[in-house]
Structures are given as structure tokens and as C-alpha cells.
Image (spheres, helix red, strand yellow):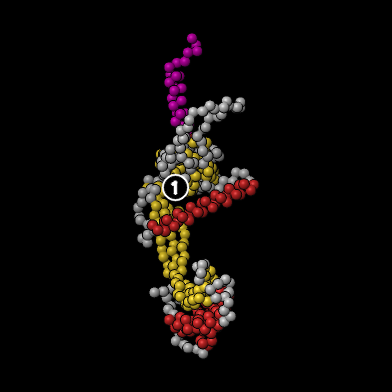
Amino acid sequence: MGNKRSPTLWFGMLIALAVISVITPVRTRQARAQGPVWDLAINTVEVIGFEEDGRVAVLFVEVANLGLEDVPPSTLAVYVEGAEEIIAFMPIEALGPESTQGVEVWLELPEGWGGTERSFAAEADANNDIQEDFEDNNFASTGPVEIPGAIEPPPQPEPTEPRDEPAPMPGPEPQPYSGGVPLRLLVLLLIGGGLGGVAAIAATLTIRHTIKIRRRKEWQQKAKKEKVPDTCQPPQHYCEVETEIELKMLNVTEIDLAVTDARTGNRKTKKVKGNIPRILNQATRVRLKHETPEQLGQWINELASETAGEAAALVYQQASVCHLSMGIHLEGIEVTSTFRLYRCVKKGQSSQWKQIDLWKDKRKEQRDEPLAMFNSIGPEDTTLNKQIADGLKEPFRKFIADYQVTIT
């Protein structure tokens, strides 16, 4: 029995195996630390809202690099759990160590999902382009989310009298309906070329732009002047507004003309810009300096004459007697509102605000003042131009004298 090993030999082999089992992981960890250590993770996946009465789900996904080295570009997959064949892919840019990238995804949901609960999921490095030591954190789910809207029961067929049905024609067996309805990702994914792809992109851009504009208007109504709070709880949102007022003198921008048919009530309008508003602004500035130059009378005559010519041309287009009205449109103070929309996101063990949108809304304070009214005038009147000019001199003189710098 010379092959038999002694107990001492067996004991030595066991010790050697134990040492190897301890040393090997240490060396492996050291080797990994010397090379690229990549670790992509899904920090956040949440449904932040619904649009179009629940037909469009808006999701926010945050991808993070928890590793020690830069991660090359990869692919993010977003889909609905239970409908994994419905999947959307989005590119993720290269990420530095401990950096993140947030992506907003718009998914159009099929009909019939209103009032039901669905779970949305996201997976980092969906194409497995990056060799990671730990991939369990590449996936995250929202959990059940209720889709707004009520479930509409299928229409019930009308009761009919029994009748003999014709024998079916021979043909292939009907295939059972799978119940799957494709989701359309409202993010540009140009898989194929051609005009069809371009048209689809144009339609997608239009839908997304329309929803975004409406969403901004809704947040403008909820915006607050106070700064964003110090603390928050996901998925809380907050809209902050800052308003700047630029004081400007009121300027005449146009003369508004309108003729109304005395018999039918049909109305036509015309906006006169250019030389007439320019002269009127010049005259009001001179009046503000308490000057009464000799050319003031000349300016009033010129204003009346040019305005009468524009108005008479509009009246001559009418078929019968009409009423002519004139007004002055002024614009002045500019108000600029800057809106910042924030969303509360998780950052490690804490939460913090993250700005997700920024836009400005500019408007000018304006007003309209009546200038003159001419009733029951007709296109057959050959002295129409002179009548209107004579009737405008005093209204223009009064406007210049009563002009106010700002809106009251």
C-alpha cells in the first residue's frame, strides 16, 4: 500500500489550498484595481407625469458611473414590464467617475391602459458593450404606476334576430389576437432612412413641442417668487420665477383702422405702420419738453392727410355705406419673467433639487386709445379724403396734448 499518503501530507495539502483560496481573490482585486473598473448603475427611474389625458407617460431616468474610470458611451433601454418586446433604446454619453446623466423619455401608451397599473423599467448597457464586474445595479423599475383615465368597457353588440349564416369560405385559420399594442417612443430614434423617417421625426417634434409649451404654461401659473426650498422629497417639483421690468416710454406702434358695413355688419381692418406712428411719436416727445415748435401744426396736417388717405382707400373697397373707426395702439414697459423648473432627485442617501428646464417669457405692456369715428360714409363720396382729414386734425392735436409717458 505504498500509494497511501500520510495524514501529515493530507494536512499540508489542506493548508496550501486554504492559503491559495485567500490569496487568489486579493490578487484578483489588485489586478482589477490596476485596470479599468467600470460600474454603470440606474440611480433613478420614475414616472414624473402624464400628458394627453394619460396617453403619454413622461419618465426620468438617471444613469450613474459608480466606478473608478471613465465609462465609454453605451445604450439605455426603457420598456414596460410585462411587455418586454416593446422596448426603446437611447444613447448614453461617456461618463466620468461618479458622474451621472439624466434622460427624459416620452412614451405614448396604447388605448385601453387608462385606469390600469403598469411598471416601467430601465436597463443600463442594454447591448452589453461594457465589461463590468457588477451588473446587478444595471436594472431598476418604478413599481406599479396607475395610468390616468378610466377603463372603457368594450361596446356591446346590438341584439339581432337569429339567422342562417353562410358557410365560411375555405382559407387559413385565423390567428389569435396577442393583445400587444406597439408603444411609440416620442424621442427621435432614426432606425431607417428615407422620407418616411423624416416625416415621423417631424411629427414627433411637433407633438413633443406642443406638449412642452402647454406644460410650461401650466407651470407658469404655479410659479413662485420664493427661492427653491432647502429640502425636498422625490418626485417633488418646484417652479421659480424672477421678474425684470424695463421702464420705457410708451410708443405709438400703429394706427388701427376698421370699416363696418352698415347693412350686413361685415368688418374689415387695417394696421397702418411706418411714417404715421413715427411722426406722432416725434410730436409727443416735443410736447413733453414743453416746446411748441412751429412745425407742430405741419405735423398735425401731415398726420391727418396720410391717415385719411389710408382710411379712404379702405372705404373705397366697400360696396355700400359703412362706419369708419380709428384707434392708436401703444406699447411700452417690457416685463421679462425667467422660469426655472426643478425636480427633486435622490443623490446617494439624500435628496436634492435638480434644474430640468429654463425658459423666459417676454411681454410688453400695451394699450389702445380711440382716435376718431366717422358714421355713414360711402365709397361714392368724392370728397371723402378731405372730410376724413379735416375731421382728424383735432383728435390728433388732443392726443398729443394729453399723451402720458407710462400706463396708468
The magenta span reads 1-27
Q: Residue at x 43, y 64 (%)?
A: 337
User: Residue extending furthest bottom?
Assistant: 294
**Foreground residue, 310 or 25?**
310
Relative height, residue 285 to residue 165 (above, below): below
Q: Position of residue 336 (x, y in %)?
A: 45, 66
Residue 38 visible from this viewpoint: no
Q: Residues within 10 Å of mark 1 (few under 14, many from 20)?
A: few
**Foreground residue, 376 or 239?**
376
- Identified by mark 1, the residue type is Asp
**Foreground residue, 22 or 376?**
376
Q: Position of residue 268 (x, y in %)?
A: 53, 69
Predominant SS along the magenta part: helix
Q: Secondary structure at mark 1?
A: loop
Could you tell me which quadrant the C terminus lies in? Answer: bottom left
The residue singled out by tag 1 in the image is 53
* Magenta span includes 23: yes
**Foreground residue, 243 or 404?**
404
Relative height, residue 337 to residue 114 (above, below): below
Residue 230 visible from this viewpoint: yes
* Magenta span includes 64: no
Q: Residue at x 37, y 61 (%)?
A: 225
In the displayed structure image, the side of residue 227 where residue 71 appears, left or right: right
